[in-house]
Image (tube, rainbow, N blue to C red):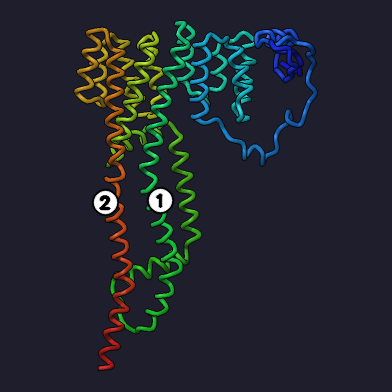
Amino acid sequence: MATYTWRGRNGRGELVEGRLDAVGEGAVADQLVSMGVAPVHIAVAAASPTDQEAPWWARLQRQAVSVEDILVFSRQMYTLTKAGVPILRAFAGLQASAVKPAMVEILQDIRSSLDQGRELSVALQRHVAVFGPFYVSMIRVGEMTGRLTEVFLRLNEHMEFERDVRERIKQAMRYPTFVVIAMAVALVVINIFVIPVFAKVFAGFNAELPLVTRGLLAFSGWMVAWWHLLLAAVVLAGLGIRAYLRTPEGRYRWDSRKLKLPIVGDIILKATLARFARSFALSSQSGVPLVQALTVVAQTVDNAYIGSRIEQMRDGIERGESISRCAAATGVFTPVVLQMLAVGEETGELDSLLFEIAGMYERETDYNIKGLSAAIEPILLSVIAVLVLILALGVFLPLWSMGQAAMGRAG
């Protein structure tokens, strides 16, 4: 495949030009005709500086494709396909209107794959790290069932919900995170710069210091002497934990433990189950077989522990067991949800009830997120109060004793 420059006239007779990637001049001409442009001149493009590898500083500053970009892409594709615009022409318009270089390259590669006769799902599979396996699988289902327009709409709604949950959690955690960081910085500054000054003052007392003061001085002296080793240990520990969490076992253990964390564990569980229910409903509504749908959903819940329980459901369904019984065996669903699954299975309205389950979990998640800051603030205030009390007692008790002694001598 090569890059071609072209010039042509649009429907109003205006001269237009641009660049296209295609296997030959004939393919370029076909693309232009599908875009409503009458080609006048087509030639192989000469290499330009933009075609060369970008400098390393440019690569570092380059913005990656974000969830918002995929969300906008899904909404635009829904609008274009609903209006009856051909896929190739739709991608040509999206590529021309995209402003982020990374997104332009992805759209260009997808167009090139479509030019070669590949299906849209196959073209998206080349960028599965950007779109995700669930997105690609749903596009494949839309192609097989002829409901691609509806799939784009459902994917857009699904991604909007996930983005909304993430943003609300970030907003709720912003204040506690800022307070924790401020506390850590304050402790480092006090132990390295403030307490050593008081240590010189206390050294001239020639008296036994309180236990709290001796503990503060010992900890401060240790930090001043070994701060570089402490910093190295923190960095190495962070890298080690990150490497461990990237392993299948580490991710499984962490995903199972974070569901049991106080305050936030319940929020994570309900948000994950809401994502499962909505994804499962969307897959089932689009005509995906149950076993295949559960296989895809297990890879997209973003939790290895819940994913393993979904795979357990899939294995039970393959053995001929009912969905409600397999769901009960996982131990992660509430009795109300299990009852709704049983009713949906008996009435054949599983899709609609799965959407109801997703809505129920979403409402509970929203309610818990709203109270997240209120639940964390008392804990933070208690920790801050204890730290301030220890520092106050450690610093001011010797000063108080010194003042009392001076007043006694004066008397």
The N terminus sits in image quarter: top right
Give the residue at x 35% y 17%: 280
Residue 217: x %, y % from top left: 37, 70
Residue at image mark 2:
378
Name the residue furthest bottom: 411
Give the residue at x 31% y 28%: 362
- Does dot 2 land on a helix, a strand or a loop? helix
Q: Is residue 47 left or right of residue 125?
A: right
Name the residue furthest front: 12
Residue 163: x %, y % from top left: 42, 30
Question: How many neighbours does mark 2 have within 10 angstroms: few (below 14), some (14-19), or many (20 or more)?
Answer: few
Closer to the camera in the image, 353 or 408? 353
Say whether disc 1 or disc 2 marks the residue closer to the N-terminus. 1
**Amino acid type, residue under disc 1 in the picture:** Phe
Q: Is residue 191 above or below residue 374?
A: below
**Amino acid type, residue under disc 2 in the picture:** Pro
Give the residue at x 42% y 68%: 221
Q: Is residue 218 above or below residue 339?
A: below
- Does dot 1 land on a helix, a strand or a loop? helix
| Cα–Cα span, label 1 and label 2 | 15 Å
Residue 407: x %, y % from top left: 27, 88
Q: Which mark is residue 178?
A: 1
The image quadrant that residue 89 belongs to is top right
The image quadrant that residue 164 belongs to is top left
Q: How many marks?
A: 2
Give the residue at x 39% y 41%: 171
Closer to the camera in the image, 134 or 65? 65
